[in-house]
Amino acid sequence: MKKDRSFARLLLVLLPLAFLTACSPAAESEGEEHGEEHGGSSSIISLTKEQIELMKITYAKPLERQFTGYLMAPARIEAMPKKRADIGTLISGRVTSLYVQEGDRVKAGQALFEIQGLEIGEIKGEFIRAQAALHSAKANYERQQKLLKENIAAQKAYIDARAAFDEARAAFSAADQRLHSIGISDAEAEKLIQLATGKTSHDSTTPTATLKIYAPISGIISKFSISLGQLIEPGTDLMEIVDIARVWVVADIYEKDLSAVKLGQRVEVETEAWPGEVFEGKLEFISAVVDEMTRTVKVRSTADNPEEKLRPEMYATMRIFHEKGRNSVVIPEDALQSDDSGNFVFVKTEEEAGENDHAEEEGDDHGEENEHGERVSFRKVPVSPGLRQSGLVEIVAGLRGDEEIVTSGAFFLKSEMTKESFGDHH
Amino acid sequence: MINKLIAFAIKQRLLVGLALVGFVAWGIVSYQRVPIDAFPDVTNNQVQILTTVPGFSPVEVEKQVTYPIEIEMSSLPNLVESRSISQFGLSAITLVFEDDMDVYFARQLVFERLASVQEELPEGVTPEMGPVSTGLGEIYQYTIEGEDYTPMQRRTIQDWMIAPSLRGVPGVIEVNSLGGYVKQYQVLVNPERLVAYEVTLNDVFSAVAENNANAGGNYITRNFEQFLVRGVGLINDEKDIEDIVVASRNGTPVYIRDVASVEIGPAVRYGAATKDGKGETVIGIVMMLKGESGRDVVKSVKEKLEEIKKALPEGIRVVPYYDRIELVNAALNTVTSSLLIGGFLVVLVLAFFLGNLRSAFIVALVLPMSALISFIIMYYTGLSANLMSLGGLAIGIGMMVDGAIVVVENVIRHIQENQRNGSNESIAVTVLRAAQEVGRPSAFAIFVVVIVFLPLMTLTGLEGKMFSPLALTISFALFSSLLLALTLAPLLSTFLLKGKISDKKNVLVEFLKRVYRPILERAVDNRKLTALLALLLFVASLGLLPFLGTEFVPELEEGAIALQAIRLPTIALQGSNHLSSAIEREVLKTPEVITIVSRTGRAEVATDPMQPNFSDMYIMLKPLSEWRDGYGKEEIVDELRERLKVIPGVIFSFSQPIALRVEELISGVRSQLAVKVFGEDLGILKKKGDEIVSILNSVRGARDVQAEQVTGLGYLQIKIDRRKVARYGLNVSDIQDVVEIAIGGKIATTILEGDRRFAALVRLAEPYRKDLEEIRSILVSTPDGNRIPLAQLADIYIEQGPAQVSREDSKRRLTIQCNVSGRDIGSFVAEAQEKIDASVELPPGYFITWGGQFENQQRANRRLAVILPITLVLIVILLFSTFNSMKNALLILLNLPITITGGIFALWAGGLYLSVPASVGFIALMGTAVQNGIVMVSFINDMRRQGTPLREALIEGGLLRLRPILMTALTTLLGLFPLLLSQGIGSEVQRPLAAVVIGGLFSTIVSTLLLLPAFYGWFEEKPASPEL
């Protein structure tokens, strides 16, 4: 009995000891400093002046400014069709003279080159003949008319002369048309007429089988594929003249954006070639159809291009300002924060942070308030952002505009506010 | 056998002497080879599988990488635990194996499985195993400094000059880099030009990829000479890339330079480093191979660095900020100084008690020699020398001399007797007789102590890894000391104790005997009163227990601070760096801080999968002597904590470099209690997690309750609309390619600069992908040659999504951490479990488990609850086999309660916590108490057998045993004294142990000298048992 009891006593002594030493709770894991009670999700947070200085938290009133929304679309520059000419001939011939070369700036009516060909001679000769025939037919007709007035000639002769005159006139008109249609100018035609009527003598300076081609518009010779002696067939494009003092800017916008664009909207164009330079214009054309392949809609504006910086086929970006400028409350993008609950900003407030707010609690616990002086409180205010551009956000709802909002360092405020909710990474 | 050994030692003195000298030499060699580190390695046996999946979101990583690998690994043999973290661009799987499994074998198995899972992974994704390293692995860390160099240049120097050389140092498994920018060739494509030249992004990508190669054309022979044919087409610089032709348009080649700009730029990074509030820096982290000697590896690394420095560009400095050697030396210093002082005190005691310097010398010689022999055993058992294992030696000092004391004391007694009797017995015979007389009991005493340390060796987990080396070295040392007591001591005695031994009564002992006798007489005469007093004392000590603080294991001091800073998960690396610098500047205001280096996000080899909102900050402190008066580590941490209040939006957590790393590696759960919710849907997990958080908060005693952050990462989702994609004849993969190349950038090829390798990346130029709007208008080429903006093919929006996905045992897991204060954790868990069962409804397939350090405590608790009784039974069996008397055995066991009383008082008086080391102290005490009890009881038994009357036997026995008992107790006590008083690194873990043993020894002395004789009468075997 004795044995048993003492042994049992011993066990009684040792077992609790073993238990106690073994199950002693672990050392406090060092410095896990989130003792705040959970659930303190007050929407006010306060920081000391020191903290604000350290984290470079700044606050200011939001800006009031015109805010316009725009749409970006890839665009390219095109010459205006009216300001562009392809140069060719309607008649075949050999190039005898070239007066211009690629890149030359030409005026409307300036001679570009000259060709010589049989057909030209024929047409010219025909013209001269027709002119001569007309001339004589006209003289005969006038004479017959006079005679008829004086009742000298027979009615028939008059009628004949008149018919011949009409005929000659028609023949001349046809020759004249032909002559002009191959590009002979009025001045040259006049010369031919004079030649035909013998007012000037036939000399070597007026070759009859040549044709000068003139620039139909002023502009720059942008394409050039002609050389001396070249045999030209009608219908070949030999040169191109463009006038880019004004150009088209054509952009493709996607279906989804169609509803936003309207004729007359202001447009800004930027190019890679001239970074930073903005060419302005207005939307003047929206295509009636959607390109079935690219699923885009063509829109267009015109840009003044006096210095000819914009060149056709150049790539550009078009900004279409689709919303009218309106006065809005505008804040820096950094000021706008978001979390699960949506977007918000921090507004400086005179209210004291609530009981549950941990920042305040820390202050109470450690008498920090006395040490570091005053605190600044901020309230989390939900807002609805509108348009964004160049680092600014328009606030559609939630701000009056006269509050002081945190403009930089808002992220740190958000962090501090949601501190309890994040923690271990394991 | 023991007698034969003694006889052999005396007969073959030369041989044995030489053997002993041999042992010493062997011991010295072993000492030099034993791996030395500061702390025992408590990391579990694990293999990390790290897979970088650039650009993948956490959920994608989990689905496509983590899950297939996990499934493949789940059936590995000896796998204890498998857990994983899937983060942005990284899958980190940790497989924990049984401790006794060879880590290289485990890695081989993992490797085989990886090979078979490879084809299930996304193309180009290759899992890699983390370095064979442990929580102690990061032994040397440095920054690369040089004002004239950009962070990218410094990173290049680290990656291509320093790290490769250091990797070659024996014992270094990895040199990790963090910070700065990794150099990269970047082909930044202008999408507008792509349109203009009618080429696609893919064209550019494949052009770069295909135009970077050398070819071998074997050789040609000309006459009798041969020439090697070599096609040289490697890209050398940016210009070469620019000149690559992408396509030909109307006979005009389209070059890369026409559609893209080629620059050298920084690669996308997931981590950064900052220092001293001065902005970004580049750091290198040298990681040691598991099981290597930290001290030696650091030494070689430093030597190598000296070599490298000569080759470094002018002005580049390698500045170490973390050097393990300092800690190793400090820890070794603590232990060795304790050893030396303790040894000195022990010798002093011997000199006083034995009154004979020669005998004291013999005993003292046992100390270093048994230490050396222990090193031999340590070397061959693969035990490393560290704070804990060497601590075992320090603790054992007093016990190590016990055997030799008993032998030498007995020899002296016999010589003195001989001198008195005028016997002419030769010294050898006297020594032999004397030594054989006490040989068995000495051996027995050592066995008893080793037996009480057995339960420690069966501890598992962290506590086992910490304390079993201690138990092992104590056992090694005790066995060595026994061997020496039976060989060296008699051997030396025959030489050193030859002459005349002074027979003068020892003044000290005589004085003590005069004090002791009246007390002993009174105790024996009033044994009921004595028993009552003893009981009262014991009860009083038990009454103190509730007032003792408790902890699991005291934290080992590392002399440095590791500060973790946690920010909102959406923060960008840049924002984190900004905050880090602010934090660093605040921390540097504390004068004790020398330097602070922050590691943010993850390093190149992501052994620690941290996201950019996490920083580990290493705060290095000046030597203790330069601290302000009254400032200790705790005060400094408090001060820092106070200073950092000013930083908003950051959660701080203070730890120490090794402790932090070990925690991260072992369990990933740092709190006492972890509620793990398992289930499929992250949303439900989060919801249930939040519910559990609020329930836990309502339970009394809950502190620091916090749910794992699984959501809150910002996502820009590009959700492909299949119908629209189909309308244009596109595949989903076409669009994914665009997302990957255009937005994320994709490595097309590798460019060699000598032996340096840099990636060449193709990506859209920044302005075309920097914002939601730009991304919406990225053009996708259709097979018809048209280009459609992304927005027309997919819904593009920003939302918050999972920040990371944690898994355990192949299931998604959400952990809620919680500490408990002011109440017993068991009852807390019970209450919380009940409440959660009642109010949290889990959908089918969802379940909750409970873990955390609480698990460890329960495990240790269960283990000790089984082992301690078994130990007691073992002791009883031993005692019974000695005395052949259950009563005697129980009498000796009675020594234990009072012994424990002293330990408890000592803890209370020292303001120390009840902890695992304290319980180790109690266990050690049990050994000593039993030892002493045996000495006393067996002596009284002997006297009784010789027919001495009971009272006389008790008094005389007590008086005669006073000297040996006091001596052995005092040696143990004084041997531990330096540990108790030491303030050095690592002393905090030994202190409770030392306190318990020292306090307990006082009460053991009292108990053995007074209580045992007093109670002897009650326990005496009435019929004299036959001789053993």
Image (tube, rainbow, N blue to C red):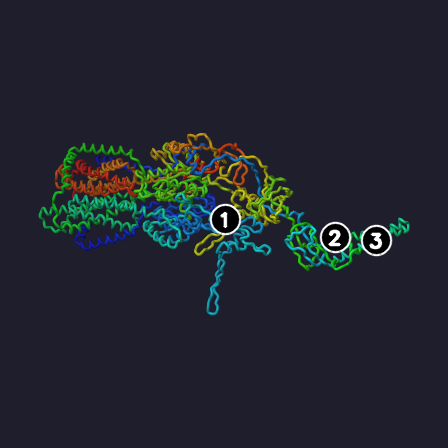
Identity, as a three-letter code, of the amino acid under mark 3: Ala
Numbered disc in front, either 1 or 2: 2
**Real-space Cα distance between discs 2 and 3?**
24 Å
Subunit bearing disc 1: B
Q: Name the image quarter holding residue A257.
A: top right
Taking depth in this image into account, of B780 and A173 the one nearest to the observer is A173
Residue A85 placed where, x, y %?
67, 50
Taking depth in this image into account, of B235 and B227 the one nearest to the observer is B235
Residue B887 seen by the camera = no
What residue would you read off at disc 3? Answer: A137
Asked if marks 1 and 2 fall on the same chain, the answer is no
Asked if marks 2 and 3 fall on the same chain, the answer is yes
Asked if marks 1 and 3 fall on the same chain, the answer is no
Location of the N terminus of chain A by quadrant is top left
Mark 3: which secondary structure? helix
Subunit bearing disc 2: A
The disc label shown at residue B134, or none: none
What residue would you read off at disc 2? Answer: A187
